[in-house]
Image: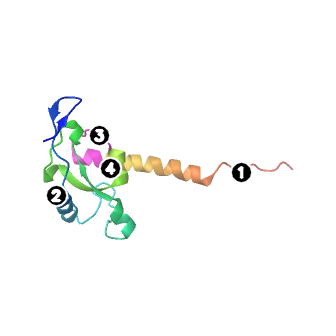
Amino acid sequence: MPLDLMTLSLVSRPVTAAEGLRILERDQYRCQYCGLDGQASFENALAMSVDFVVPRARKGKKDPGNLVACCRACNMIKGRRVYSNFEEARAHVLSRRGELRKAWEARAAGPPSKTAKA
């Protein structure tokens, strides 16, 4: 096991390609947070990864019960926070995705148009 130089403690190795493939297959290449179908397109397939529900940084174990298929966007949104259960993590990710979507849509719409004075 590698050594964390900040804490001088042993940390588990990252998920191997074979382990990750088993998790993705188990979850049918579908993000367990937002439902993105990793088999629907090449772009979706590139976005898929494996997430530690309890992050490694928070002593999460590398066992199948703590690993889920996840798109990179949801993985970044979830971050290193620890949740009491998977459903709480999923609710947080979906809520945050909704907030980010609203902010993006407001920005994409542009500034309110100025009406000409008659």
* Range of magenta residues: 79-90
- Amino acid at the residue labelled 2: Glu
> Which residue is labeled 1 in the image?
113
Look at discs 3 and 2 and give the one toward the viewer: 2
Look at discs 2 and 1 and give the one toward the viewer: 2
- Give the label on residue 75, or none: 4
Distance from disc 4 to disc 1, alpha carbons, whole Å, reads 37 Å
113 or 53: nearer the viewer: 53
- Give the label on residue 19, or none: 2
In the image, residue 95 above or below residue 45: above
82 inside magenta stretch: yes
Classify the position of the N terminus by image quarter. Answer: top left
Q: Look at the numbered discs 2 and 1 and tell me whether their residues touch, using CB distance below 8 Å.
A: no
Sequence order check: which comes first, mark 1 or mark 3?
A: 3
- Amino acid at the residue labelled 1: Ser
24 or 97: nearer the viewer: 24
Q: Secondary structure at mark 1?
A: loop
Callout 4: 10 Å neighbours few (<14), some, many (20+)?
many
Callout 3: 10 Å neighbours few (<14), some, many (20+)?
some
Q: Give residue 65's position: percent from left, percent from top.
A: 14, 51
